[in-house]
Each structure stands twice: as C-alpha cells, then as structure tokens.
Amino acid sequence: METLVLALDLIGTFVFALSGAMAAVRHRLDIFGVLVLAFTAGNAGGITRDLLIGAVPPAAIGDWRYVVASVVAGLVTFWGYRTIHRIRDALLIFDALGLAVFAVSGTLKALAFGAQPIAAVLLGMVTGIGGGMLRDVLVGQIPTVLRAELYAVAALAGASVVVIGQVLEIRVVPVAVIGAALCFGLRLMALRRGWELPVARPIEPDATDDHLT
Amino acid sequence: METLVLALDLIGTFVFALSGAMAAVRHRLDIFGVLVLAFTAGNAGGITRDLLIGAVPPAAIGDWRYVVASVVAGLVTFWGYRTIHRIRDALLIFDALGLAVFAVSGTLKALAFGAQPIAAVLLGMVTGIGGGMLRDVLVGQIPTVLRAELYAVAALAGASVVVIGQVLEIRVVPVAVIGAALCFGLRLMALRRGWELPVARPIEPDATDDHLT
Amino acid sequence: METLVLALDLIGTFVFALSGAMAAVRHRLDIFGVLVLAFTAGNAGGITRDLLIGAVPPAAIGDWRYVVASVVAGLVTFWGYRTIHRIRDALLIFDALGLAVFAVSGTLKALAFGAQPIAAVLLGMVTGIGGGMLRDVLVGQIPTVLRAELYAVAALAGASVVVIGQVLEIRVVPVAVIGAALCFGLRLMALRRGWELPVARPIEPDATDDHLT
C-alpha cells in the first residue's frame, strides 16, 4: 500500500515535471532553466502544502527520489522534446492521474498534520495545482489553471471526498480511491468534452490599473 | 474588543478580496480564477506573515471565516461586477481601512511571536501589502504598490507607531488606534491629493537584461 | 572567523540589493519599489532557505544589519543610479563574490539544520539565486538565471563541494574556502568567456498554451 502510494506520487511528480520542462523549452530557457521548471512544476505544490502545515523540510527536497524524478523528466524533455511533444495527448491522461494522486495524498497529509476540514481541502487542491501555477508565473504567464479548463475543480472534488470521508469516519483506503477516481474522471471528462468554467465580462477589458477599481 | 478586531479583520479581508476578484474579472479569468485571486488578495499578506513568524497553519486557512469572506467577495464580484465597479471610489475608503487594520494587527501578531522591532514593522507592512502584490503577480503585472501612489508608506507608518508604543511600554489599545488612524489618514490624504512617491530616471528605460547592470 | 563570514554575508546582501535596486529604477518603480526590490534581491534567497529548513523568523528579517544593508543599497542606487550604472562591470565581480558566499553559507546552514546532502546542495543554490529570481518575477520578467549565462551552476558547484566535504568529514573551513573559490572562479570565467548553457529548440516557439502540451 505504502509502496503503491509512493509509486503513484513519483509518477505524478514525473508527469508534472514533464509539463514544466516543456514550458521551459517552449520559452527557450537553457538546460538549467528546464531542470528548475521541471522541479518546480513537479514539487512546488507539495512544498507549499508542507510549508503551510509546518512539515519542514518539505518531503520534496528531503527525499532524493523526488529530485531524481524531476531531473530525469527535465533531461528527457530537453533531449527528446519532439517525442514528448508528439505523445502529449497521452501525457494529459497521466497528468490527470498525477492531479488525482496529489489532491488525495495532499489532503491526507494535511489531515495527518491536524488541519481543519476546510484547510485540508484547500491544501489538497494546492498540492495538485500549485506546481503548475508557479511554473506559469516563472515563464511570465497568467496561470492557465486560473483562466481555462476545468482542472482545479477536479482536485477540489477529490479533496472534498477525502475530507468528508474523514469526518464521517469511513476507512481511509476506499475513501482515497473514490476521491482519486472522482478527480481523475472529472478531469478526463473535461478534457474530452472541452468543459470550461464561466467567465465574467469586464466593463473595460484592457484596463491596466489593478488597484481595486 | 476581541470581537471588534475580528470584525475589522474580516472586513479588511472582504474588501481586499474584492480587489483581487475585480482584477481577475478584468483579466478574463474564469470563476475559479476569480475565487483564487479573491482569496489571494485577501489573505496572502497574513499568510506570508504567519509563515515568517512560524505560526502554522496560518490563521487564514485554519479559520473558515476568512475563507468564507473571500469566497463571498469573489462571488459578489463575479455576478455583480458592474455594481462593484460603480461603487469603486467608496470601496477605496474601505480598502484604506483594511490596510490600516492589517498593518496594525499584523504588527501586533509579529510582536506576540517575539519578532524584533524592525522585523515587526516589516511584517506589519507585509500583512497589509502582500495580498495585493501576489494578486498583481498572478495576473502578470508589476505590483502596483511598487510603482504608484503612496500606499505601503501608510502601512509602514501605522506599523511603526505600534512598535514604538511597544518599546515605550504604552498600553496597546490606544497605540493600536493611533497607528491605524495614522495609516488610514495618510492613505486617504494620498488618495484625495494624488500623493505619489518620487521615481528615479534610468539611463536606458527599456533595457531588458536584468542582471545587475 | 565568525566576523569574516558575517562581513562577507553583508557584502553579498549589499551587492545583490544593488542589482534589485537597479532593476527597479530601470522599470520606473518609485522609491518604495526600489527599496522593496533591493531587499528582495538581497534577502529572498536566504529567507526561502530559512523557511524550507524551519529557521523562523528568517535571519534576514530578524537581524537589522541585513535590512540596513539593503536599504542603503536601495538609496545609493536611487540617488546615484548613473554612478552605479557606470561601475556595473566591477560590481559583477562583487556579485560573483556574493554568489559564492551565499552558496557556501546557505549550504552550511542547511546542513546545520539537519538537511540531507541533496537537499543541502539545493538549498545552498537557492540561497544564491533565489533573490535574483524573485527580483525578476516582481518586475514581470522570466528570471535571467533560467535563460542566460552560467550562474546557478557555479552556485551548485560550490554547494556540492561543501556537502562532499561534510560527507567525507573534512574540516569545514578549508572546504568552505574551496567551495567558495570554485563558485567564484567558475562565475568569473563564465563572465569573461561568455559561457552559456545549451538551449533546446522548441517546435512552436511562440505557443501560448502552457498546459503540458
């Protein structure tokens, strides 16, 4: 069981790291930048969660396997960009799997550190989306999770299932599986059907002053 | 007293969250992005302070009322953008109130956790301006507090009053009220008179290489 | 010895703060923005390291000398931009010195807080490059360390020497000196010879969707 969770976690880190490395290559970063974005996309969500619950040093920097998974993903992308680019649709399925695993394991870790229910849901979601958000900020873009597609909501749903199960004192394994399956299924459906969240219409779309008004 | 501080703190969170949600709508984020920016603008300052003083988990994610205040502000803005836009001048007054409350309460919390005087002033200021800074970074803009208007200086003044009062061992309530009033007053004057801080003139205004030179 | 390390650390903070202040002036930030970017560039690396190892409050905000070094660098730049601009080549040598000192002292501090070898190397590197990265993000640019020049690799090399020395149980002073010298030398050579890291060629260089594909 323990081994299964670790294996899924490392797969999630690896696939997320691929997304970071792809973004880095596309923005013409050098090989160091590719490795940094790979590590960031793969681990920043978990690191943020660990900082917020006081679990220092964060697992992602204390455990060499996460570093290795990120570095390998970065090197694979740097030398095999065309191949990774070609299989990107298949990778989106692994990305959905990574999101599901991160959302559920992040929520469980937050609960284990005594987080309240709402906090645990938020921390599970942050574990899933934090890496991609920092990846986008580092290449100077508005995080894609904030403006397109149904992505974070899938993580939110998975995390909520875990917390509700905990409150109702249901055994953790089936709850974790259901939470991950819900997140994974929602994300796949969103990909297949192009589900998006609603957008509000601003009055002045290109205003540049961001100070409240 | 306790209740008054909490009420002011929640009002500050709510108004700051409105500013985040407005920025999100203006940049055409989806409803999830609106909620994230609302939460960020309302709470990132306090979360940063809590991380820096070791108060984990941060109050903003441990206490559901801050989450609710942020989500409500996000939804109100998403569905009532035009109304919020119309009353934006009035909201700037509440924003100044939020700044004053955050600067003072942030400084007091830092002192309560044993921060040195200079650190407490900086942490009070960060509590007031951190949320707006991260809001701007997430929508790809240089933080407005760094380039326009007298805003952070008001927070700095309020925080300094609180620390000076602590060093002189004056009772905390009157000191907090004076600090908040100074911050609020400075910010209102800056708004009314268009006070700005000086800007230096670079030699090559559109240089793009940022590496020391 | 203690005094020497502190002096080098403050020199590093001061020179890094100059780079932040220069970037702020170039992006036309006001004087408050100049001071914030000076502080950020000089201290964000060490603060990040301290957060990740649980050393709160971080030294940079708990010790007034780091604040003073940053503020002085900011004011000097604000009023003497032209002078700083003229001596920028000489400053790059001090910047390399700051990088060397930060990489080594950051690694040693991480080891002192019980970080594992790989984590200590990463934390030493973060201490050296974190300030510059956040400086660039705050002015809306992709961090220069990710896309140009051999900079982080020098920090990585210096940090690795320190960790290897620790693993082999060699006395700390000579190891620290060798690590710093290696980092400093590599960086100087990179500056003189224009060494750069390789860049991969993306298929579609101006794609804007960052979601894995």
Image (cartoon, coloured by chain):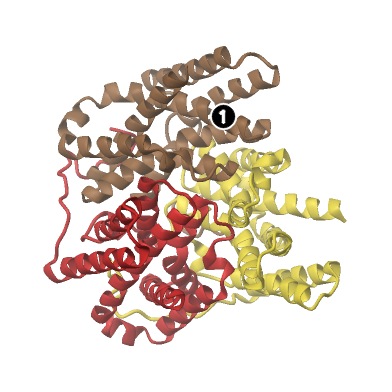
Chain colours: A red, B brown, C yellow
Q: Please rate how many residues cluster around mark 1, counting C-alpha atoms within 10 Å: few if below 14, some from 14 to 19, many from 20.
A: many
The quarter of the image holding the C terminus of chain B is: bottom right
Q: Can residue B104 be seen in this view?
A: yes
The quarter of the displayed image where residue B196 is located: top left
Which amino acid does the dot numbered 1 rest on? Thr
Secondary structure at badge 1 equals: helix
Q: In this view, does C6 lie to the left or right of C62?
A: right
Q: Is residue A98 above or below residue B121?
A: below
Question: Compared to A64, does C97 lie above or below?
Answer: above
Give the residue drawn at x 54%, y 61%.
A58
Q: Furthest residue to the left? A: A193
In front: C124, or A1? A1
Q: Residue shown at 62%/50% (left/top)?
A: C43
Residue at 43% in and 86% down? A79
Determine which quarter of the picture holds residue A197: bottom left
Relative horizontal placement of residue B156, taking residue A99 as reference (left or right): right
Instruction: Residue under label 1, please give it.
Output: B107
Quadrant of residue C200 within the rendered picture: bottom left
Q: Where is residue A50 in the image (x, y as percent from the top left)?
A: 50, 57
Q: In this view, does B174 lie above or below C133?
A: above
Q: Which residue is farthest right?
A: C1
